[in-house]
Structure formats: C-alpha cells, structure tokens
Image (cartoon, grey):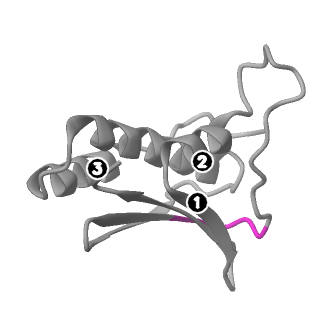
C-alpha cells in the first residue's frame, strides 16, 4: 500500500521564486527553474520514498544550484519512456532540457539530485 498524500513543495517553490526575482532573473528562466524543481521534488517523493524531501537553493555568480535529497540509494536515469503515449517517465528528461547541468550523487543515506541554471539562460 502506498500513501496518497502529496508532499507540499509550495514553500520551496516560493523561496526559489523570491530568490531569483530579487536577483533580477527573467520570468521565463524562473519558470524553468520552478518546473525543474517540481520534477525533482516529486521524484524524490514518488521514487525516493521521502515524504518531505530536503531542498537546498544556492545562488552565486549568476548561477543557481538546486539540490533535492531523498532516502533512496538508486541513482536516477534520464530516459524517455518506452511508450511515447505514457503519462509519466519524462520528468528527468524535462529537467535536462530545462537546465544547464543535471546530476545525482550518492550520500550515506540516499542521494541528492541537483540541477544548475544560469541567469543568462
């Protein structure tokens, strides 16, 4: 049996939006960052088994790095689903398309999935 309660990512999204807006980033880039955050956050909940994924935002030298930690040691693979009409399976492919860099790193417990965006995107 699986819990159906979705995690609340609204505070992470608000923090991200406020951070980038105050730094003068373009709205289209902010939207890309929000969508990428949403995909990584939901993956941490759905596939990583983490009810409250930990999000870290870092902004330096016009470069944003977003990291989301979960409890699963399984590193993600970015690939298109076998069935092109499938309703899921495109999240990490989308993150790769929206960002400049994307990756995952194992941790003592679980992993961290991260992406980077530059203000000039």
Disc 1 from disc 3: Cα separation = 22 Å
At 68% from the left and 55% from the top, the residue drawn is 49
- Of the numbered discs in the image, which one, if any, rests on residue 96? 2
Q: Earlier in the sequence, mark 3 or mark 2?
A: 3
6 on left or right of 46: left
Single out the residue that lies furthest toward the right: 82
Marks 1, 3: nearer the viewer = 1
The percent position of residue 37, horizontal first and vertical second, equals 45, 48
The foreground one among 39 and 97 is: 97
Q: Is residue 66 visible?
A: yes
Disc 1 from disc 2: Cα separation = 6 Å
Instruction: Judge whether 55 appears above or below 107 on screen.
Output: above
Q: Mark 1 points at which residue?
A: 102
Name the element at disc 1: strand
Name the element at disc 2: helix
At 12% from the left and 52% from the top, the residue drawn is 24
Q: Name the residue under label 3.
A: 11
Magenta range is 68-73
Residue 69, magenta (yes or no) = yes
At 61% from the left and 54% from the top, the residue drawn is 44
21 on left or right of 116: left
């Amino acid at each position: 049996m699986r819990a159906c309660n979705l995690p609340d990512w609204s505070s992470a999204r608000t923090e991200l939006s406020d951070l980038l807006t105050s730094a003068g980033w373009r709205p289209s880039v902010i939207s890309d960052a929000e969508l990428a955050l949403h995909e990584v956050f939901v993956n941490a909940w759905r596939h990583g088994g983490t009810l409250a994924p930990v999000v870290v935002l870092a902004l330096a030298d016009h470069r944003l790095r977003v990291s989301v930690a979960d409890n699963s040691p399984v590193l993600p693979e970015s690939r298109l689903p076998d069935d092109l009409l499938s309703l899921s399976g495109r999240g990490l492919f989308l993150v790769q398309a929206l960002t400049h860099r994307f990756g995952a790193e194992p941790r003592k417990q679980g992993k961290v999935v991260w992406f980077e965006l530059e203000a000039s995107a």
